[in-house]
Amino acid sequence: MTHWTKMERDELERQYSPSRWSHRMSADDVIKAHVKALKEGTEQARDLAQTLLNVPYGEGDGEKLDVYIPKTNSLDVHLVVYLHGGYWQFLSKEESGFMAVPLIDKGVVVVAVGYDIAPKGNMDLMVSQVRRSVVSVVQQYSHISGLYLCGHSAGAHLAAMVLSTDWSQYSITPQIKGAFLVSGIYDLLPILSTYVMEPLKMTEEVAVRNSPSKLVPQLKLSSSSCQIVVAVAENDSPEFRKQSEEYYKALEESGLSVTMEDVANTDHFNIIEQLVDGEYHLTKLLLKMMGKN
Ligand SMILES: N[C@@H](CC(=O)c1ccccc1NC=O)C(=O)O
């Protein structure tokens, strides 16, 4: 495959337009269906679960999270923090509780984090926000028996940045037991000059300091005992698939506990939408990681 540095801008932008690679629908329709699926799933979770909505984790307007709470008397409660996708400029926590139903069913707490997407937020701010959200969750729920992270697309990038945090600047060091990184981007340099970054206005310096691919040594220091799953859709674009494969290899080579999941019959969107279903491969894998199968 042609290296991204040798691609014409058109081709690079096609590679980084996930909606153009779905085998199910047209580009416009797959995005519409994605937003609809996430919204409906979140509505259902809000109907079924006990919730704490708009809990602040910082001073900023956008620094709020939603908690989906299971009915359980168990002391062995696990918690999954979900970071939504949308190329750092779409979506919000309002449609990010969709995965809660099968998880609360098994006694797992789900937290959907809001962060300031572009143009309001920039990359450094979003990374700082998701890091602070995790610290706040740990402070609030210090009794939980396991903290897990799950992120999709841009949210997988943010989750990888959380794993790569130097926590010495923070009040506590969260112990993250597992992370599900789904169809993420781990090297921001290829998209720096594409349409994706127009609302983000990033410099190369910002892209480098926020690329998990450049922070593997820090991840090794901060998250050495975290079990990491790098998942990618069969019908993600070749560039997206390469992003996941290369990040997986870098983690593996540094001796981390990481597995690669190439999820058959999925595209960039339904690879995560299907987490509404308790029987879906990734839902089962997530529950298994928490010992809840
Ligand atoms: N231009 C992008 C748009 C995109 O990625 C997106 C748009 C709305 C909601 C979510 C999106 N992406 C992943 O979560 C694409 O081609 O899919």
Image (cartoon, rainbow, N blue to C red):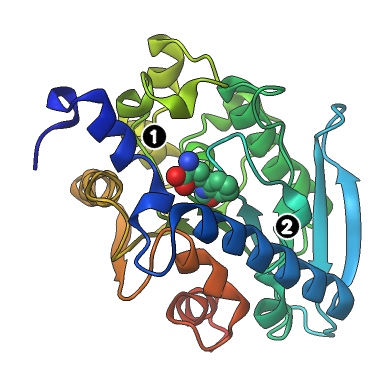
Q: Using the numbered discs, state the Cα–Cα distance from disc 1 to disc 2 in whole angstroms.
A: 26 Å
Q: Nearer the viewer, mark 1 or mark 2?
A: 2
Front residue (pair 162, 210): 210
Q: Quadrant of the N terminus?
A: top left
In this figure, which residue is indicated by the disc labeled 1?
212
Categorize mark 2 by other alpha carbons within 10 Å: few (<14), some (14-19), many (20+). some
The amino acid beneath tag 1 is Pro
**In the image: residue 186, left or right of residue 30:** left
Q: Residue 153: image x %, image y %?
A: 47, 48
> Which label's residue is closer to the chain start, 1 or 2?
2
Residue 95's label in the rendered image is 2
Query: Residue flagged by tag 2: what amino acid is it?
Result: Glu
Q: Label 1's element?
A: helix
What crowding class fits label 1: few (fewer than 14 Cα within 10 Å), some (14-19), or many (20 or more)?
A: many
Q: Which mark is residue 267?
A: none
* 138, 260: nearer the viewer: 260
Between 78 and 91, which is closer to the camera in this rendering? 91
Instruction: From the viewer's perspective, tell me whether residue 161 is left or right of residue 233.
Output: right
Q: Residue at x 79, y 57 (%)?
A: 141
Q: List x then y, in percent, for residue 154.
A: 51, 42
